[in-house]
Image (spheres, rainbow, N blue to C red):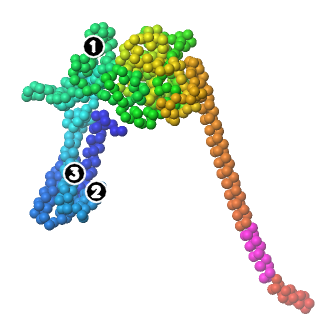
Amino acid sequence: GGDFSKWGRVSHSLARRGELLERVKRLAATLGVAGDVWYSCEEAEYFYLDHVQSRVEAFEARVAAEPGTPVAEAFPFADFFADAPAQPLFPAGASRGEHLEAARACVRHIRGMFDELEDYRAFELLRYQGHRADYLLTKQARIVALTCTHAAMTRSRLVELGFKYDAVVMEESAQILEVETFIPLLLQRNDAVDGESRLKRVVLIGDHNQLPPVVQNLAFQQYARLDQSLFTRFVRLGVPAVQLSSQGRARPALASLFRWRYRALGDLPAVEQKPAYLAANAGFAHAFQLVDVPDFEGRGESTPTPHFYQNLGEAEYIVAVFQYMRLLGYPADRISILTTYNGQKQLIRDVLEHRCRNAIFGMPDKVSTVDQFQGQQNDYVLLSLVRTRSVGHLRDVRRLIVAASRARLGLYVFGRRRLFEQCYELTPVFSQLTGGGRPDALALVRNEHWPATRGVNDAAPAESLHLVSGVAEMGMLVVRMAEQVQSAIRAQRQGQYDEEQRRLEHLRLQQQQQQQQEAAVVEQADQEEREAADGAAAGDAGGAAPGAAPMEQEAAAADGAG
């Protein structure tokens, strides 16, 4: 994707300016105009006034005075539009009116080029990136995205720049302090004439059934109600509001965990028709389940430092389930691990670093607290409740609604069942997590791999079901599966190695055969050369023998005379 920061917008504008000036250069070449008319936006504007506009006026005058003149013949920019997608510009079967409309559309395109260059002319005067960013912000930007905190930090500077806007859309406004809500409304000066604000529309988007703003001081939070957002105040006062009537995130079974909190919340067709929502979660008997986690090694929750809650048993269990899912083929980026305390988040990250930082498992998409994960989602969520002595801040049902509404396809909650199901505020959720004959031991389905072929409403075969007794058994199960996967990987690598060795041996044999054939060819050539040489020598010897006899006779006659 593109860089939509202010520096990215500056870079895009500079690149766009260069692209438009190249088009102006080409236009000048097609019109036969010499000179560096494309060197700057200012030169391009003079070129338009001197050469382009005059040709446009002459064209309009000619087609009006000479109705019989073909538009294509009078149009002065035909060469510039020779590479236009729609060719020919003036089809033979079209009427004169259609030809005129096509020509005027081309003229409007040229005018748009120079209008856009006029917007970038300031970049030739502003040499610093910061000044260019301010220019874009105050003169060209149609949508500006920023946080309330950044708005507070830059308010004086924006007012000084003369920043103006007509509408504010505030997302997650139910999680913003009331005083912070007013800051984005005050980023511009009031009208100099009547003193009224230019702001015409404010749209607040949020969910007052989820977590409120964070206030660290409990006295301010509980007695001054500083944790009440302006959005929530409007809802409590009965200000007319538009409430969504359908959700499109979670499968219907999961949506039942938080549907009770909203008025007539239905489901969009997508969550009932898309294949991902119709398939069961591979390896799991249920789409959501509460898994009871007893004391691990004699301990439940612990606090190494005050308010830094941890639960080693739940951390080990969740990491083991994550490993199990990865061994079944679940993508790591579709799994998120949530917890209700920062201490548990750090503990889970430590266990993951120790056990999963390798090629087989990898790391999940996010390990986060419920509060920090508000506004986000993922396909599968593993949730750790941590506490074993008291319910803690999960007693705020809004936090539980956030936790239950983050998953799209699967939610598996790990906690102390006896503690949380007795909490009256949490009954609507935990009655569904534990009801319907669902066991509090993790129910797995053997011999399945992601993605599952079993439907979400299809019961798994009884012989394939397996209830995990606890953390230790889940860990042993993962160890056995990992060993099988490693054995399969080793066997695959050995097979690949053997195949490579066979391939190399085959190549070696081929090279050996080729060398032998080449040696045989060379030997045969040498043999033929030797035979040819022997034949030539024999021929020379046969031609010299008849001439030798008369000489010998002459020599013998000479001896006789003596």
Mark-to-mark CA distance, 2 and 1: 62 Å
State the residue at coordinates (19%, 56%): 101
Q: Earlier in the sequence, mark 2 or mark 3?
A: 2
Is mark 2 in CB contact (under 8 Å) with mark 1? no
Q: Quadrant of the N terminus?
A: top left
Q: Position of residue 260 (x, y in %)?
A: 36, 21
- Secondary structure of the residue carrying tag 3 is helix
Q: Earlier in the sequence, mark 2 or mark 1?
A: 2
State the residue at coordinates (35%, 26%): 375
Label 1 neighbourhood size at 10 Å, few (<14), some (14-19), many (20+)?
some
Q: Position of residue 28 (x, y in %)?
A: 22, 56
Q: Determine whether, in the image, residue 480 is placed left or right of residue 404.
A: right
300, above or below 516, in the image: above
| Magenta segment, prevailing SS (helix, strand or loop) | helix
Residue 426 found in image quarter = top left
Of residues 554 and 99, the one drawn nearer to the viewer in this rendering = 99
Q: Position of residue 525 (x, y in %)?
A: 71, 67
Q: Amino acid at mark 3?
A: His
Q: Position of residue 533 (x, y in %)?
A: 75, 72
Which contiguous range is marked in magenta?
Answer: 526-544
Where does label 2 land, which residue?
86
- Secondary structure of the residue carrying tag 2 is loop
Residue 542 magenta: yes
Q: Quadrant of the C terminus?
A: bottom right
Q: Determine whether, in the image, residue 69 is placed left or right of residue 562.
A: left
Please identify the residue farthest to the bottom as the structure is shown: 561
Say which mark, if any, is on residue 226: 1
| Mark 2 or 3: the one toward you | 2
22, above or below 97, in the image: above
State the residue at coordinates (30%, 28%): 244
Say which mark, if any, is on residue 497: none
Where does label 3 land, which residue?
109
